[in-house]
Amino acid sequence: MRGKWAVGIPPRNFTWIIRDQLALSERPGGFAPNHRRVRRQEELIWLRGQGFTRIVSLLVSQHNLQAYEDEKLASAHYPLMPGTDPRPALADAFSDLDASLRSGARVLVHQEELGERVMGVAAGFLVWSGRLPAQPQAIALVEHLIGHQMGSAGRELVVAAAGLPPRQPV
């Protein structure tokens, strides 16, 4: 590949939550009816070129997991199923994120689109991991970084995260 496409393109709504460590975006390639394989490929090229080594999917489905494997990007899948208790998925995702960040990985977290549920996961992780001391601060920070308010579904995830056992010191 040559030219500007050789470096790929950033995923839509790409946003750093912890600079150079943890970012959020919509699903590489776009969400459901707008998903394009070529765009996904270009976005995965960009992610790899930016030093990303891990992708965490919060999708209900297993979409894109094979594409991540094909691109030699480690991935994990923690589906946030609507209408179910999110705490088991959050506990697993938070432990994975914490271990990945401590090992020096650069991680992207996504769902179909960058909406309030992904925002809620990010804010919940910031508090759970001890990076921020309180839920209101984490919510305000994530809202500021993303550029819009977090709705009730995201705030419910932050509250659910508060009910998890705290991160174990290393």
Image (cartoon, rainbow, N blue to C red):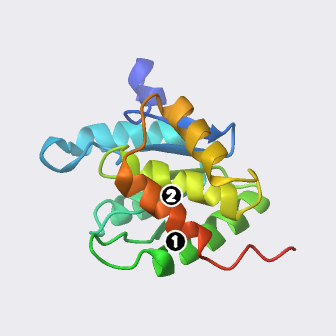
Q: Position of residue 22 (x, y in %)?
A: 62, 47
What residue is disc 2 on? 121
Kind of element beneath mark 1? helix
Question: Which secondary structure, mark 2?
Answer: helix
- For label 1, the residue is 90
On the image, the x and y values in percent for residue 50 come to 60, 36
Assess disc 1: are there few (<14), some (14-19) or many (≥20) residues with their C-alpha within 10 Å of its C-alpha: many
Vertical side of 123 occupied by 157: above or below? below
Q: Quadrant of the C terminus?
A: bottom right
Identity of the amino acid at label 2? Val
Q: Residue at point 61% right, 47% down?
A: 136
Among the 4 quarters of the image, the one containing residue 48: top right
Depth check, front residue: 156 or 70:
156
Kindly report the distance in space between the C-alpha atoms of the residues bearing marks 2 and 1. 7 Å
Q: Residue at x 29, y 43 (%)?
A: 29
Are discs 2 and 1 less than 8 Å apart at CB? yes
Point out the image quarter for the N terminus.
Answer: top left
Q: For the view shown, which residue lies furthest in the left direction?
A: 33
Q: Residue at x 63, y 63 (%)?
A: 97
**Residue in the foreground of this view, choosing between 16 and 37:** 16
Q: In the rendered image, which quarter is residue 68 located in?
A: bottom left
Q: Is residue 39 left or right of residue 127?
A: left
Can residue 110 be seen here? no
Q: Nearer the viewer, residue 117 or 39?
A: 117
- Horizontal and vertical percent position of residue 142: 55, 40
